[in-house]
Image: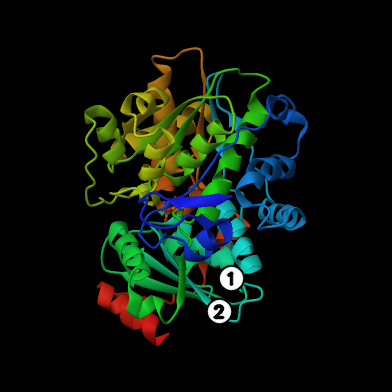
Amino acid sequence: MKYYSLNRKAPDTSFANAVIKGLAPDRGLYFPETITPLPASFFEAIASKSYNEIAFEAIKQFVTPEIPEPVLKTIIEETLSFDFPVIKLNEHISTLELFHGPTMAFKDVGARFMARCLGYFNQNNDKDVTVLVATSGDTGGAVANGFLGVKGVNVVILYPSGKVSDIQEKQLTTLGQNITALEVDGVFDDCQDMVKKAFLDESITSKMQLTSANSINVARWLPQLFYFMFAYKQLHQQHDSIVFSIPSGNFGNICAGMVAQQLGLPIKHFIAANNANNVVTEYLKTEHYNPKPSVQTISNAMDVGNPSNFIRIQEIYKNDFKQLKSNLSSFSYSDAETKAALLEIYERYNYVADPHGAVGYLGCKEYLKTHENTHCVFLETAHPTKFLDVVEEVIQTKVDLPPQIEAVMDKTKVATKISTYEDLKVFLLNS
Ligand SMILES: N[C@@H](CCOP(=O)(O)O)C(=O)O
């Protein structure tokens, strides 16, 4: 499979090179040259297939033969070693729990898949790769965990100081070994801008091989399409019209869902559920795309003011606003509304959601007002205990800590503070 740059000023490249480089030389995101729909028989038989079989068939065209089929099977088996259950709240709303992995956020799948692909491509390379990653909360921990101890790979995580939850911070600052955390005096968008700038800085790239483990990297982004297939596998025999409400920050997850739809998965509609960082909600209202500095919310992983993957979504719909609008709705909610939703989900369904899931739930409710004969699945993108203070305060109940969270609670944070791009550069060049 060839990948092209969405800025269209760089040569097409292979999957291996797209993974190793992260971003094209013209600073564009890579996009697959073709998306060939899977046969109808694949979806008809999906209930009888395992997660691993579904994932293998779904991603094969994007990564083989550079990743040989037997290697891909092993990568998938190691990546998907936990569950993805759908929990039904009522006849019209379910949630897909994406938090059963090691860091209890949906990023675990992409991070583990990418780490293994990079490890495979790098096995005969004597040059180390430095993975630069910006996080507003969950990516950092998942990438730290997924890449821990991977030979020839050093990971540098940039996160906005004071704007991630305590547990998220522990997950990304306490592992040591080949993982380093940089605490940035700024917001997520500053971290992401610094990362993108470093890719173009010859004084850095001439000395080290950089790549990204954000969803801008195709190996981090594409495996997220599995989730939509796993939900469909569990629900399609009871519901024939399924819509997804996706809590959205950098828009990688929802965009991967759109790739699943291009592969033939019968998804009726997408809802981008936003917090106050509502650039896409506004775009669908006004047709003006107006990135803004991100604002801090209780659903912090979505605190993104200029979502990287929106350009991929535009590409899928060929920049046709009408076509996009017929497939995508977007709603935005305040923290007060999110807290009220958390409480409602708890009181009505005895279910403890996290703030991101609560925003997704609100998206479902809004859409169902005008589309009664639909089943809406909102993605629970992270475990509620990652946001313990907010969740316990809202539901006024103590929540048990899962072992993955307990394991990091007492660890000591190690992070280097930086403020500017120059600080990052100095850090990289001296590390
Ligand atoms: N939601 C993110 C922000 C980065 O998103 P990514 O999917 O591009 O890594 C986070 O939790 O850090």
| Label 1 close to label 2 by CB (< 8 Å) | yes
The CB of the residue at mark 1 lies under 8 Å from ligand 1: no
Residue to which mark 1 is pinned: 148
Which structural element holds mark 2? loop
Residue 262 rendering spot, x and y as whole percentages: 54, 32
Compared across the picture, whether 84 is left or right of 245 comes to right
Quarter-wise, where is residue 360 in the image? top left
Relative vertical location of residue 126 with respect to residue 216 in this rendering, above or below: below
> Which residue lies most toward the bottom here?
430
Give the quadrant of the C terminus.
Answer: bottom left
Residue to which mark 2 is pinned: 177
Residue 398 rendering spot, x and y as whole percentages: 50, 48
Residue placed most toward the observer, 231 or 365: 231
Relative vertical location of residue 308 with respect to residue 327 in this rendering, above or below: below
Alpha carbon distance from label 1 to label 2: 7 Å
Residue lying at 58% horizontally and 25% vertically, measured from the top left: 266
Residue placed most toward the observer, 31 or 400: 31
Residue placed most toward the observer, 8 or 199: 8
Query: Disc 1 residue type?
Result: Leu
Residue placed most toward the observer, 357 or 73: 73
Residue 427 rendering spot, x and y as whole percentages: 36, 81
Residue lying at 55% horizontally and 26% vertically, measured from the top left: 89
Residue lying at 35% horizontally and 59% vertically, measured from the top left: 27
Residue 390 rendering spot, x and y as whole percentages: 39, 48
Residue lying at 34% horizontally and 60% vertically, measured from the top left: 192
The CB of the residue at mark 2 lies under 8 Å from ligand 1: no
Q: How many marks?
A: 2
